[in-house]
């Protein structure tokens, strides 16, 4: 994983506020004064989040490092989760391979639902603000987080992004992770749910080839169904594979390009947002 391959070892990420042009650097695994926006939102929610990371390596030092990195990230993710809950914010972590359609789905969702939901976006990529500019053009406030050599977003990167983004109370924060079906599965960001996007151009065996990602996701969006007649992809087999690694996963079949099947996804977002608000008074 990342602590072994080195992409998180001293990696420097950059947060870009696309509204103001402000850029700020963040060192991987730093502990920041999270979310100090001058607001006091106390609440009595229990935000415990248990991660079990059973990695076996030849060197005990490597295992210790991995555990330390993940533990630190989980602590910061718990702060993010509490911060979201205190503001009744629905936070979703969108993950996929590169090119599966995360940004297109976000653009379409923002445009179609702007009268019903208030969206804020943390856009993650290794480099460029291309996707962030697309989200800005769609009409949502957005900060770009460029991870440099890093192959995933981490909880502290999201926290720094939120300091710039300042999402409103009761809003929806969409976190578009770096395109990668491996490492983002291990790093909790404090989200309400992971949403994994799989396109029909990728292969129906992806859920069993990358089981950790699909096990950690609550939703699987099967995107680009408008291309099914042009590719060799077995929808039922894909769903069967997803259910084999995660029996409770919810599957939506849609095309972000044509709009087919989007209503079910929109309804799920609306219901999840309502649930977050109701849980604030539970």
Image (tube, rainbow, N blue to C red):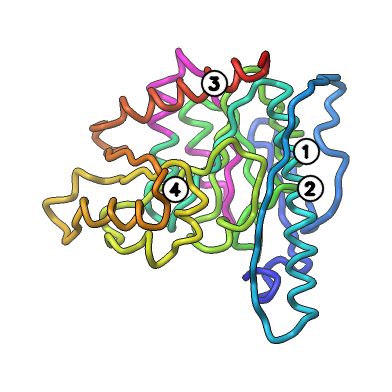
Work out whether 88 lies above or below 204: above
Q: CA distance from mark 4 to mark 2?
A: 23 Å
What element does badge 1 sit on?
helix
Vertical arrangement, residue 83 with respect to residue 6, above or below: above
Specify the segment rendered in magenta.
Answer: 107-134
Query: Which residue lies at the image location 74% right of the left edge and 39% below the top edge?
Result: 22
CA–CA distance between discs 2 and 3?
24 Å
Q: Quadrant of the N terminus?
A: bottom right
Label 3 sits on residue:
275
CB atoms of marks 2 and 1 within 8 Å = yes
| Mark closer to the chain start, 3 or 1 | 1
Q: Which residue is mark 4?
A: 196
- Separation (CA) of disc 2 from disc 1: 7 Å
Residue depicted at x 83% and y 20%: 42
Q: Hey, which residue is sitting farthest left in the picture?
A: 229
SS for callout 2: helix
Q: How far apart are the two marked residues, 3 and 4, measured between alpha carbons?
A: 20 Å
Q: Which secondary structure, mark 4?
A: strand
Q: Which disc is residue 75 wearing?
A: 2
Q: Residue 152: say if magenta.
A: no
């Amino acid at each position: 994983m990342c602590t072994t391959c080195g992409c998180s070892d001293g990696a420097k990420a950059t947060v870009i506020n696309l509204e103001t042009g402000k850029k700020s650097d963040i060192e991987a695994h730093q502990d920041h004064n999270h979310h100090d926006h001058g607001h006091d939102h106390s609440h009595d929610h229990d935000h415990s989040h248990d991660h079990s990371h059973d990695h076996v390596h030849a060197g005990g030092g490597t295992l210790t490092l991995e555990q330390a990195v993940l533990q630190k990230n989980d602590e910061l993710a718990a702060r993010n989760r509490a911060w979201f809950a205190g503001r009744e914010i629905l936070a979703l972590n969108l993950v996929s391979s590169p090119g599966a359609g995360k940004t297109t789905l976000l653009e379409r969702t923002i445009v179609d639902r702007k009268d019903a939901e208030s969206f804020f976006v943390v856009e993650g990529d290794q480099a460029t603000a291309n996707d962030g500019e697309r989200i800005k053009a769609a009409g949502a406030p957005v900060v770009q987080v460029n991870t440099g050599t890093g192959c995933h977003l981490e909880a502290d990167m999201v926290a720094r992004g939120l300091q710039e983004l300042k999402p409103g109370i009761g809003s929806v924060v969409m976190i578009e992770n770096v395109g990668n079906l491996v490492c983002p599965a291990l790093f909790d960001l404090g989200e309400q749910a992971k949403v994994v996007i799989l396109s029909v151009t990728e292969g129906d065996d992806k859920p069993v080839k990358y089981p950790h990602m699909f096990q950690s996701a609550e939703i699987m969006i099967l995107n680009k169904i408008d291309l099914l007649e042009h590719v060799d992809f077995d929808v039922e087999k894909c769903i069967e594979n997803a259910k084999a690694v995660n029996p409770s996963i919810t599957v939506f079949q849609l095309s972000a390009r044509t709009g087919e099947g989007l209503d079910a996804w929109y309804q799920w977002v609306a219901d999840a947002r309502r649930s977050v608000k109701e849980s604030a008074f539970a």
